[in-house]
């Protein structure tokens, strides 16, 4: 990784927000797999490991679909040195909050205890 100047960012496992990208990918992967998987198991009345064979194809399909956050396919984004976040910056203005507005913040379990 050092040869390609890649920084590895590690998140905290206890803080769900640090794992948001991975969790979203896992959710999408589960949505793609398990409807088909449950249908197979329902018909066969047996546990099926067919999802293991389908995994490379599903990951390839996900990597070739345009994602909403970066507005490009992950396979293309991997080859780039830098990804522009112009779309994210332009949408950010919609979420600005005035200084005199009261806002509620939802804490994660244990966040107030320093955990």
Image (spheres, rainbow, N blue to C red):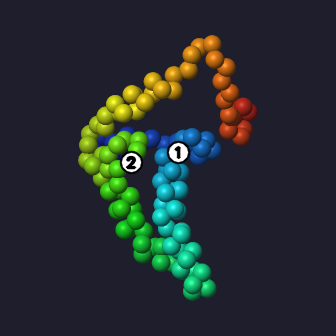
Residue 77, position in %: x, y? 30, 46
9 left or right of 84? right
Place of residue 66 in the rendered image (x, y in percent of width and height, measured from the top left): 35, 50
Image side of residue 32 versus residue 75, left or right: right
| Helix, strand or loop at mark 2 | loop
User: Dot 1: what SS?
Assistant: helix
Outermost residue toward the front?
94
Rendered residue at 32%/56% (across/down): 64
Q: Earlier in the sequence, mark 2 or mark 1?
A: 1
Residue 82 shows in the view: yes
Residue 31 position in % (x across, y down): 52, 62
- On the image, the x and y values in percent for residue 95 come to 51, 26
Quadrant of the rendered image containing residue 56: bottom left
Residue 20 numbered tag: 1
Alpha carbon separation for disc pair 2 and 1: 15 Å
What residue is shown at x 43% (from left), y 30% (from top)?
Answer: 91
Return the mark for residue 67. Answer: 2
Task: State the residue in front, 32 or 56.
Answer: 32
Q: Quadrant of the C terminus?
A: top right
Q: Give the mark count.
A: 2
Pair 2/1: label in front:
2
Instruction: Name the residue at the top extreme.
Output: 100
- Eyeballing the image, is 87 above or below 32? above
For the point 49% across and 57% down, the residue is 28
Residue 37 tag number: none
Determine whether, in the image, residue 34 is placed left or right of residue 100.
Answer: left
Badge 2 local density, few (<14 within 10 Å), some, or many (20+)? Answer: few
- Residue plotted at (40% across, 33% down): 88
Image side of residue 113 versus residue 45, left or right: right
Density class for disc 1 (Cα within 10 Å; few <14, some 14-19, many ≥20) is few
Q: Taking 18 as reference, is 47 above or below it?
A: below
Q: Are marks 2 and 1 in contact (CB under 8 Å)?
A: no
């Amino acid at each position: 990784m050092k040869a390609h100047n890649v920084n590895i960012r590690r998140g905290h496992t206890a803080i769900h927000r640090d794992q948001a990208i991975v969790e979203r990918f896992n959710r999408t992967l589960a949505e793609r797999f398990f409807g088909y998987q449950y249908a197979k198991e329902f018909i066969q009345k047996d546990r099926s490991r067919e999802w293991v064979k389908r995994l490379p194809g599903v990951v390839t399909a996900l990597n070739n679909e345009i994602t909403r956050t970066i507005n490009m396919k992950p396979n293309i984004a991997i080859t780039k040195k830098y990804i522009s976040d112009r779309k994210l910056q332009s949408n950010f203005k919609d979420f600005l909050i005035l200084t005199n507005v009261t806002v509620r913040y939802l804490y994660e379990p244990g966040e107030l205890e320093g955990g």
